[in-house]
Amino acid sequence: MNVLIIDDCIAIGKKLNELISENKSVHVLGQAQSIRQGFEMLTKFNPDVVFLDISLPDGSGMEVLIHLKKTNPKVKVIIFSNSANDLYKRKFAEKGSDYFLDKSKDFTQIPEIISSLIN
């Protein structure tokens, strides 16, 4: 399973990479730090799973989610944000996100979610 991280925070990307890479069936393709980089890497790699931040320097992760679900509806999108309020959760779910995790408290759920996506 190939995973792409789209998040402008290098430290978050590093931590995600460490957690995801614990599973030997998973390969982290890299980290995009903007929507522009994200689109380039999505085109190049066609990942199975995308960890996506909401707030990126050049726009909203919503734009990426909508594009992903139109071009590759099977891709699993995990929203990973500091803005984990009910309104955002609902809006992103309506557009097709598969999970919505809070950066401040949901890191421990990531290995289990990754394992469930493999099976």
Image (spheres, rainbow, N blue to C red):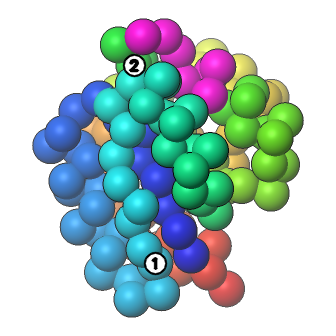
First in sequence: mark 2 or mark 1?
A: 1
Q: What stretch is highlighted in magenta?
A: 58-64
- Residue type, mark 1 in image: Val
Q: How far apart are marks 2 and 1 (CA)?
A: 25 Å
Quadrant of res 118: bottom right
Q: Mark 1 points at which residue?
A: 26
Give coordinates of residue 93: x percent, y percent: 73, 34
Q: Which label belongs to residue 40?
A: none
Residue 71, magenta (yes or no) = no
Query: Image point 56% across, 56% down: which residue?
Result: 45
Question: Badge 2 local density, few (<14 within 10 Å), some, or many (20+)?
Answer: some
Residue 72 as seen in the image, left or right of residue 11:
right
Q: Name the residue under label 2.
A: 56
SS type, badge 1: loop
Give coordinates of residue 92: x percent, y percent: 68, 28
- The image shows residue 66, relative to residue 68, as above or below, that is above
Query: Image point 41% across, 48% down: which residue?
Result: 5
In what quadrant of the picture does the C terminus appear?
Answer: bottom right
- The image shows residue 62, relative to residue 1, as above or below, that is above
Residue 44 as seen in the image, left or right of residue 30:
right
User: How many numbered discs?
Assistant: 2
Whether residue 50 can be seen here: no
Give coordinates of residue 74: x percent, y percent: 80, 57
Quadrant of res 91: top right
- Residue type, mark 2 in image: Leu
Give coordinates of residue 77: x percent, y percent: 62, 47
Residue 27 or residue 62, whichever sits in front = 27
Residue 62, magenta (yes or no) = yes
